[in-house]
Amino acid sequence: MPPGPEPRSRRTGRRPGDSGAREAILAAAKAAFADLGFDGTTVRGIARTAEVDPALVHHYFGTKERLFVAAMELPVDPAAMIAGLLADGTDELGPRLVRTFLSVWDAPDDTSAFLGMLRSAVSHERSAAMLREFVSTAVLGRLLDALDTDQRPRRAALVGSQVVGLAMARYVLRLEPLASAPAEELTGPLGGTIQRYLTGPLD
Amino acid sequence: MPPGPEPRSRRTGRRPGDSGAREAILAAAKAAFADLGFDGTTVRGIARTAEVDPALVHHYFGTKERLFVAAMELPVDPAAMIAGLLADGTDELGPRLVRTFLSVWDAPDDTSAFLGMLRSAVSHERSAAMLREFVSTAVLGRLLDALDTDQRPRRAALVGSQVVGLAMARYVLRLEPLASAPAEELTGPLGGTIQRYLTGPLD
């Protein structure tokens, strides 16, 4: 840890054992992400609002990304998910990515959580920025760091467009037969598209 | 025209020359599409609410589709747009479709109108149904009627997923570099995807 001011927990009412500290951190994180976006939010700022030491935030939540996952009540940690996807290399990465996203989103509770984020992003510019920054950092950036291709930001955005479009068509617009199709019927065509965006020719 | 009851305009205060008739029809149409969806709305029902003869609705607006375009203040009539796209055959239809959609959506006023529909669809199940039914009938159905391929509903839904995903990535999430790219840089990769969904192998 870099040197910092004396831990604030000594000077405030909150200490590691405080039952309310975790909840205070989550509430502060939710507010900060909504106000400042993902990139603009700092663990230090959240700790200040929650009146705890920044080390306590790291103790409970690890990274800023993991704190975001907890604050937004996301069903999975994208970092772990992407690591799992990349463990088997980049061949067939597109179909595996589609299969993995659908396995998460198809669970009814998780569909709601995800739709909540989409609704918010479509209605509020700040929520859109928050989702964009988080997806870029935690999902697409990490995915593309593992690839050895040209034009990586362009590829990432193209992948994003088809993944978000799949979610919109299946869960929001409910375009049939895509809305009711078993996941395995979608991994072929959509996975093929995403594989081309990731590693194929772009024209 | 099928035989029907005596024209209502004779029995109400509204006649073809009434300055308020067109506005009354549009207001009734907006309410009907919102309440009943596109498929559930009838010209006869709109005429009844607006207290005009159904023939007057057809006189002002032609088809139910064209009335929808007017009531939702859409910047283009999809029927005319699709006819234009199909005039040059189905080779390169994917890239032409991307180019045409972007030329409409990139106009700032039209971006707002379109975003309004997307916002509404993401937040309200009935708006989602309305958009789905209209897009299926007026855009995708018409496009696929012109194609000679198998699995047409599945192809239509796949095209819809990439088109909606493009709109979400470019205008809502603003994923760079896709959000700021000139339209011509997007027609290659996205047009290629849509062409495959329309006429290529699906696995």
Image: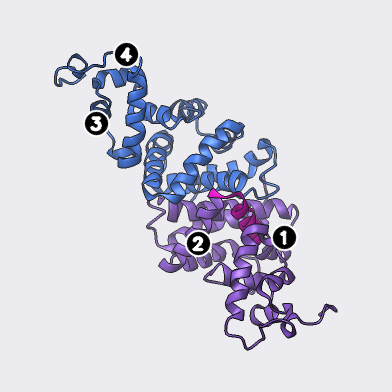
Chain colours: A blue, B purple
Dot 2 amino acid type:
Phe
- How many C-alpha atoms fall within 10 Å of the one at disc 4: few (<14), some, or many (≥20)? few
Q: Are marks 3 and 4 on the same chain?
A: yes
- A170 lies above or below B97: above
Badge 3 or badge 4: first in the primary sequence: 4
Dot 3 amino acid type:
Gly
Choose top left, top right, bottom left or bottom right for residue B139: bottom right
Identify the residue position indicated by label 4 in the image.
A18
Identify the residue position indicated by label 3 in the image.
A45
SS of the residue under disc 3: helix
Label 4 is found on which chain of the structure?
A
The CA distance from mark 2 to mark 4 is 49 Å
Q: Are marks 4 and 1 on the same chain?
A: no
Identify the residue position indicated by label 2 in the image.
B114
The CA distance from mark 3 to mark 2 is 37 Å
Label 1 is found on which chain of the structure?
B
Q: Which mark is residue B40?
A: 1
Pointer 3 and pointer 1: residues touching (CB < 8 Å)?
A: no
Tell which tag, 3 or 4, sits nearer the viewer. 4
Q: Is residue A187 visible?
A: yes
Q: How many marks?
A: 4
Magenta stretch bounds: B123-135
Q: Position of residue A55 (x, y in %)?
A: 26, 18
Q: Nearer the viewer, residue A151 or A82?
A: A82
Label 3 is found on which chain of the structure?
A
Tell which tag, 2 or 4, sits nearer the viewer. 4
- How many C-alpha atoms fall within 10 Å of the one at disc 2: few (<14), some, or many (≥20)? many
Q: Nearer the viewer, residue A9 or B88?
A: A9
